[in-house]
Image (cartoon, rainbow, N blue to C red):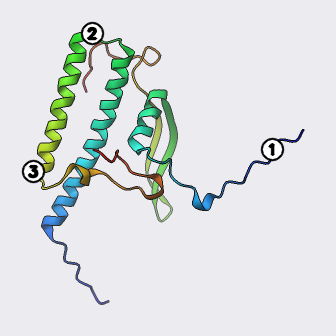
C-alpha cells in the first residue's frame, strides 16, 4: 500500500484546533448573551444582577478578543459555514 | 369552492432561512423550551458497547421553568 505522506504543518493544526475550541466557546457565549438579553427584557432581575450580567458579558467578549489574538485568529474565523443551513454565527461577529 | 392549488416545494433548490444564523435559531428553541428523550447505543460490528439514555429538558429559566436552586447554583 503506497503510504502517501500527509505533512500537516503542526502550527496550522494547532491553530485549527484552537479555532474549533474557540468556535464552541463563542457559540455558547453568544447563546448566553441572547438569553441574558431576554431575561433583561423580562425584567424580573434586580439592578445588581443586571449590572453583574452586563459587566461579565463585556469582560467575556474582551477575553474572546485576547484568546483569538493569542492564537493568531480573527473573530470572523470562528464562524462556520454550514452550507445549506447558512452560517453558525451572525456574519458581523 | 376548491382551495387554490399549492405549488409543490422544489426540495432541490430549497434555500436556508436567509440570513438567520444557527445561533439565533438555537436561542429561539431555548426560549420556547425543548425536551430531548431517546436512547442511543454505540456498537462496533453489531456488538453494542455504549448506551446513552436521554431525558433532557433544555429551556430558558422563567417562571414557567424555574431554576432548581435559589441562587446561581454550582455552575
Residue B62 x, y percent position in the rendering: 42, 18
Label 2 environment density (alpha carbons within 10 Å; few <14, some 14–19, many ≥20): few
Q: Please tell me whether mark 2 sits on a helix, a strand or a loop.
A: loop
Q: What residue is pinned by disc 2?
A: A46
Q: What element carries label 3?
A: helix
Residue B44 location (% of width, % of height) = 44, 62
Q: Is mark 1 on a helix, strand or loop?
A: loop
Q: Mark 1 points at which residue?
A: B4
Dot 3 crowding, Cα within 10 Å, few <14, some 14–19, many 20+: few
Q: Which residue lies furthest to the bottom in this view?
A: A2
Numbered disc in front, either 1 or 2: 1
Query: CA separation, marks 1 and 3?
Result: 59 Å
**Residue A66 placement, left or right of A27:** left
Mark closest to the chain's N terminus, 2 or 3: 2
State the residue at coordinates (44%, 44%): B20
Q: Residue at x 24, y 15 (%)?
A: A49
**Mark 1 residue crowding within 10 angstroms, few (<14) / some (14–19) / many (20+):** few
* Mark sitting on residue B64: none
Q: Label 2 is found on which chain of the structure?
A: A
Whole-percent x, y for residue A33 in the image: 30, 31
Left or right side of B3 for A29: left
Which residue, given by chain and number where applicable, does mark 3 sit on?
A: A70
Q: Which of A28 and B19 is in front in this view?
A: B19
Amino acid at each position: 500500500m503506497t503510504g502517501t505522506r500527509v505533512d500537516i504543518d503542526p502550527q496550522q493544526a494547532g491553530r485549527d484546533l484552537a479555532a474549533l475550541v474557540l468556535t464552541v466557546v463563542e457559540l455558547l457565549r453568544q447563546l448566553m448573551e441572547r438569553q441574558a438579553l431576554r431575561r433583561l427584557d423580562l425584567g424580573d432581575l434586580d439592578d445588581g444582577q443586571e449590572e453583574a450580567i452586563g459587566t461579565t458579558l463585556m469582560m467575556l467578549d474582551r477575553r474572546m478578543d485576547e484568546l483569538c489574538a493569542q492564537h493568531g485568529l480573527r473573530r470572523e474565523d470562528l464562524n462556520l459555514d454550514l452550507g445549506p443551513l447558512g452560517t453558525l454565527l451572525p456574519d458581523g461577529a | 369552492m376548491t382551495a387554490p392549488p399549492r405549488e409543490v416545494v422544489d426540495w432541490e433548490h430549497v434555500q436556508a432561512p436567509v440570513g438567520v444564523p444557527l445561533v439565533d435559531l438555537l436561542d429561539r428553541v431555548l426560549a420556547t423550551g425543548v425536551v430531548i428523550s431517546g436512547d442511543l447505543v454505540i456498537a462496533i460490528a453489531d456488538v453494542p458497547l455504549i448506551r446513552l439514555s436521554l431525558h433532557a429538558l433544555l429551556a430558558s429559566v422563567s417562571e414557567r421553568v424555574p431554576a432548581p436552586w435559589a441562587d446561581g447554583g454550582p455552575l
